[in-house]
Image (tube, helix red, strand yellow):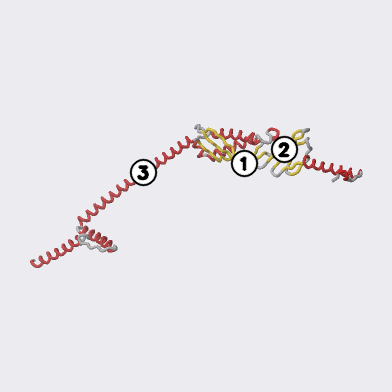
Amino acid sequence: MNFNQLKVPKMGPGGMGASVVGLGLTIGGYVVVNHCMFNVEGGHRAVMYSRLSGLSPVVRGEGTHFKIPWLQRPYIYNIRSTPRNIKSLTGSRDLQMVDINLRVIYRPMQEKLPQMYRTLGLDYDERVLPSIANETLKSVIAQYNAIELITKREQVSAQVRGRLQDRAKDFFITLDDVSITHLAFSPQFTAAVESKQVAQQDAERSKWVVEKALEEKKSIVIQAQGEAEAAKMIAAAIANNPGFIELREIQYAKEVAETIANSNFKVYLSSDVLLMSGMARSLGKVAAERKTGWVSSVFG
C-alpha cells in the first residue's frame, strides 16, 4: 500500500468547528458526571467540606448531589445499625479475672454528623467504642463478686447497657442494643467452683442418706411395735381359745394346697407336710370327747 496515494478529505471551516464543539461537550459531560456529581446510597448520609467556608452544617440525604471539583469534597457516613464485638479482661470485687465479650449495635446520630466529622472523623467507632466499653465494663464488674456475675447476670447487663448508652451520647453515637454474650473465669476459679458444687452435692446426698436411715429406723420401730402388739393379741387369743392355733394351721394349709394346685407339677405330700396335723388332733380330740361322753353315759 502506498501511503502517498491516500487522500485526506477536506473539511470546511464549519465542519471543523462542529467537531471541536462536540469534543468539548464530550469532555465537559465526562467532567460533570465524574467530578461534579456524587451519589449517596441508601442508609448513608454525606457532609460537605468546602475549601472556602469549611464544613457545612447541612447533612446530604440519599440521592445524587452536585459539587464543585477541587473546591468541595463530600464525606459519606453509614447510618445503618452496625454490630460490633468488644472483648475485655477485667477484675471482679473478689479479685477474680473475668473474660467478657460485649456485643453492641450502634449507629451515628444523623443530625450530629458534621460535629462527629469535625471531632472524630470517619473512623469514629474505632476511636470511641473500645475505650468507653472497657471503661464501663471495668467500673460495673468491680461492683460484683464472681458468683454474683453469674447469678445476677441480667442485672449486670442492664447496668452496663445504661452506663454505656449515656457515655456514647457524648460522642454522638446511639446504641440500639448492648448485651453480654460471653462470661468466662480463670481455669483455677472454674475448677474451685466445680469442686465446691461437687462437695455440696455430696453433702446433700449424705444428708439424704441420714434422713433415709432415720426413716427406716422409725419404720422398723413401728413394725416391731406392731408385731409385738400382734403377738400379744395372738397370745390372748390362744389363752382364751386353744383352737386358734389349729385354725391358723388350717388356713396356712389351705394356702399351701392352693399354691400346689395351681402349679404345673405333680406333688405328693403327707398331711403333716400340709400342716394337717392340727386338724387331725382336732378330730381326734372330738372323737375322744364323744367316746368319753358315751362311756360315762353307759356306766353312769
Q: What residue type is labelled 3?
A: Val
- Residue bearing mark 1: 83
Given the current orientation, which residue lies at the most extreme front position? 1
Please state which of residues 65 and 282 is positioned toward the viewer in this rendering.
65
Give the x, y percent position of residue 64.
76, 43
Q: Which amino acid does label 2 sit on?
A: Tyr
Horizontally, is 44 left or right of 223 in the view?
Answer: right
Residue at 84% across / 43% down in the picture? 23
Q: What residue type is labelled 1?
A: Pro
Q: In the drawing, what numbered circle is on residue 75?
A: 2
* Circle nearer the N terminus (1, 2): 2
* Foreground: disc 3 or disc 2: 2
- Vertical side of 287 occupied by 148: above or below: above
Q: Distance between the residues labelled 3 and 2?
A: 74 Å
Horizontally, is 167 left or right of 11 in the view?
Answer: left
Give the x, y percent position of residue 76.
71, 39
**Contact, mark 3 vs mark 1 (Cβ under 8 Å):** no
Q: In the drawing, what numbered circle is on residue 199?
A: none
Please state which of residues 293 and 200 is positioned toward the viewer in this rendering.
200
Horizontally, is 188 left or right of 210 in the view?
Answer: right
- Residue bearing mark 3: 209
